[in-house]
Image: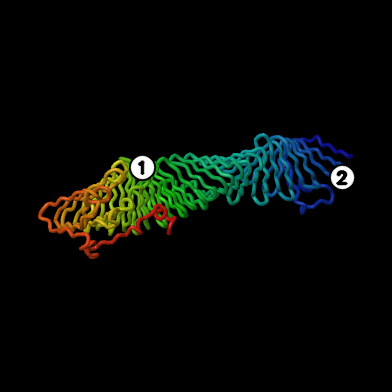
Amino acid sequence: MTRLLFFVILFTYSNTFAQNQLQPAGASQSQDLVEILKSDQLELITENGVDLRKVTNGVFRHKGALLYSNLAIQNVTSNLIEAFGNVKIMQGDTLTVTGDTLYYYGNTRLAIVSGKKTVLKDKKRTLTTRKIEYDMANGIANYRVPGRTVDEENVLTSKEGFYNTRSKEFTYYKNVKLVNKKYTLTTDTLLYNSITKWSDFQGKTKIVNKDGIVLGTKGRYNTESAQSSFHTRTTVDNETYTLTADSLAVDGKSNNGKGKGNVVILAKKDKTILNGDEGYYWKAEGYSKIFGHAYVRNVVSNDTLYIRADTLYSFENKLDSTRKLVGNKNVFIYKSDFQGQCDSVSYNTADSIIRFFRKPVLWSDQHYQMEADSITAFLVNNAMNRMLLKGKAFVITEDTLVKQFNQVKGRVINAYFGEKSKLKQVLVDGNGESVYYAIDDQNKMVGLNRVECGKMNLLFADNRVNRISFIGKPDGRLIPPKQIKPVERQLDGFNWQITNKPTKAKTTWQEL
């Protein structure tokens, strides 16, 4: 082994000296060797035909980048530099990489920097890890050990990551966590563009801010505008509601949300749940809209009220934490003690009043049917207490003893219910007409009563008229059983529609 030792302390090398005087015989500039610009001490070594340079406190230059270290070994043959101690790479005036150890492959311009604290820093962010591989030719840095990236707005940590220094795009893998003063995002894989501020993520993802939590598996989030969109089943959860859908778009500033595909909106305070194919939520207004197989569930006292409609609206009164529900077009309603259908409906949870409009028809168990131009149902303790029928009001009760129908009609009818929502009283005000079967003490039919009177009061027991009184002069007659004609058994407008009575399955779109 031949060793040539220089004990000359060199403070400055010219490019000509570095490229011509220190290159081995026959070398040319086309080899593009890394230049030595400066060193405190230089030792030229030849081992097994390989030319090496040992540089102390040196500065190298290559393709516009500067390399610093306390000690460096340069392999002239392979154009490789191994550097140790206070390693630093400077690329222009925008980017530096520092660490304890450097392997720099001059032919490919790949730099591998490692140490207890390895740092890549540009004008706006700092990446800290233990080992960085930096492809200087393409401007791509990566780390495969836990790293931490900090800029003026965010702190991002992950087990692996890539940073494109030119496009300013980051790709992070495994245990990714992005912390911002407004939110925290955790995920498995994250692509973050620091220019557009968009973060695209895949895998189990959680976004937490002061207003709530977002849970999803695939989507994107803008760290500046707080806009987000999710492409798989996702949930937005805050103190007032939960919104879940197959895809979601959320405005993080207003917390307004739009969902598509099996949408479920849960209002937590009053246990109201809206379901549908597409839904919207406006948080500040406390307003929701849902349509496409839309139905709502309101759980009160271990009983559930279901309302189905083409479109459903929910309005929250923030002063008293109550809610108004509105259904529009093709409305079906189901509750354990009554069912109905109409064209539109409104339900106020504050006073437990349900209003039905446009030809509503309601049933209370299998034996009562009520219809009118509009019906208002009053619930007490979540049970039917009274129904107010206005305009062409018609009440039908099936008399199970005679297998016929008692009927009452008038301009306005108030129907009152007792235990288990059994009809107990009907008050008719205006244009009253009735058809009912008279029964004796032996439960035998006496005949058919047909009465017309402006006002009347009917008391029911066991699905039959028990007592009846009239205000004003009634016009009526009792028809003996054998003289009853089929046409006399029904009032004009009679239409028994029990087969149309909604079921729970039909109200929740399970039965079409």
Q: Which color scheme is applied? A: rainbow
413 or 47: nearer the viewer: 413
User: Is disc 1 placed on a helix, strand or loop?
Assistant: strand
Could you tell me which quadrant the C terminus lies in? bottom left
289 or 168: nearer the viewer: 289
Q: Earlier in the sequence, mark 2 or mark 1?
A: 2
Q: CA distance from mark 2 to mark 1?
A: 90 Å
What label sits on residue 219 in the rendered view?
none
Q: Amino acid at mark 2?
A: Gly
Say whether residue 277 is visible: no
Would residue 69 be found to the left or right of residue 299 on screen? right
What label sits on residue 300 in the rendered view?
1
439 or 511: nearer the viewer: 439
Are there few (<14), some (14-19), or many (20+) residues within 10 Å of tag 1?
some
Would residue 106 be found to the left or right of residue 476 on screen? right
Q: Which residue is mark 2?
A: 49
**Residue 150 in picture, x, y percent from top left:** 56, 40
Q: Are marks 2 and 1 in contact (CB under 8 Å)?
A: no
Camera-nearest label, 2 or 1: 1
**Does 237 sit above or below residue 505?**
above
Q: Residue furthest right?
A: 1
Q: Amino acid at mark 1?
A: Val
Could you tell me which quadrant the N terminus lies in? top right
Task: Give the residue drawn at x 45%, y 41%.
Answer: 212
Would residue 427 be found to the left or right of residue 14 on screen? left
**Residue 492 in picture, x, y percent from top left:** 22, 63
**Does 300 sit above or below residue 230?**
above
Say whether residue 483 is visible: yes
